[in-house]
Image (cartoon, rainbow, N blue to C red):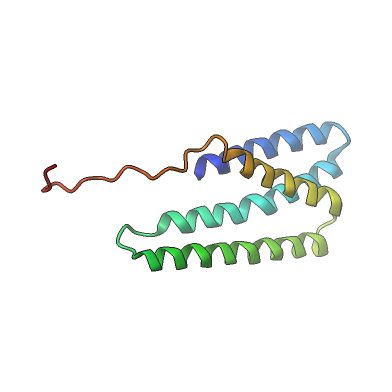
Amino acid sequence: MRVLLVGQLVIAALVVLVLAVWPGPAVAYSAMVGALIAIVPNWYLANRLTRRGPGATPDQALRGIYTGELLKIAFTIALFVIAIRLLDVAFLIVVASYLAMVVVNWAALLFIDLGEAPRVSSAGSSS
């Protein structure tokens, strides 16, 4: 997940740099805000999901995933409201750059192995 977040940051930085040159800094600022609205909640969810210890039951793990995703959605909505109400941004640019980061997530599914991680065998077991 951290690779995906770094990829999002790199793509967002490239887009913001290009937009800073053309059409200008105001558009680049709005694009940066939209990208951060996507990246920050993703970082929160990734951090939350990687904190869970190996002793969690399946019910606890699933509850944690659902709770984390719900909090991520609430966090995203709150960031959109804050950005639109308090920052001087272009709404369509913010939404477009947010959606661009969502597309990066979807595209990453083509390249990231989501298979089960290999299990570490216990020291005393023999196969």
User: Does residue 13 appear to the left or right of 92 in the view shown?
Assistant: left
Image quadrant in which the C terminus is located: top left
* Residue placed most toward the observer, 114 or 92: 114
Image point (55%, 57%), residue name: 44
User: Does residue 21 appear to the left or right of 98 in the view shown?
Assistant: right
In this picture, is 95 found above or below 57?
above
* Residue placed most toward the observer, 103 or 50: 103
In this picture, is 73 found above or below 32?
below
Report x, y in % for residue 94: 79, 51
Image point (75%, 38%), residue name: 16
Report x, y in % for residue 106: 63, 43
Image point (75%, 60%), residue name: 80
Count the marks.
0
User: Does residue 120 appear to the left or right of 61 in the view shown?
Assistant: left
Q: Quadrant of residue 51?
A: bottom left
User: Does residue 79 appear to the left or right of 123 in the view shown?
Assistant: right
Report x, y in % for residue 126: 11, 44
* Residue placed most toward the observer, 102 or 82: 102
Report x, y in % for residue 14: 71, 33
Q: Residue furthest right?
A: 23
In this picture, is 58 found above or below 24?
below
Image point (71%, 47%), residue name: 35
Q: Quadrant of residue 76?
A: bottom right
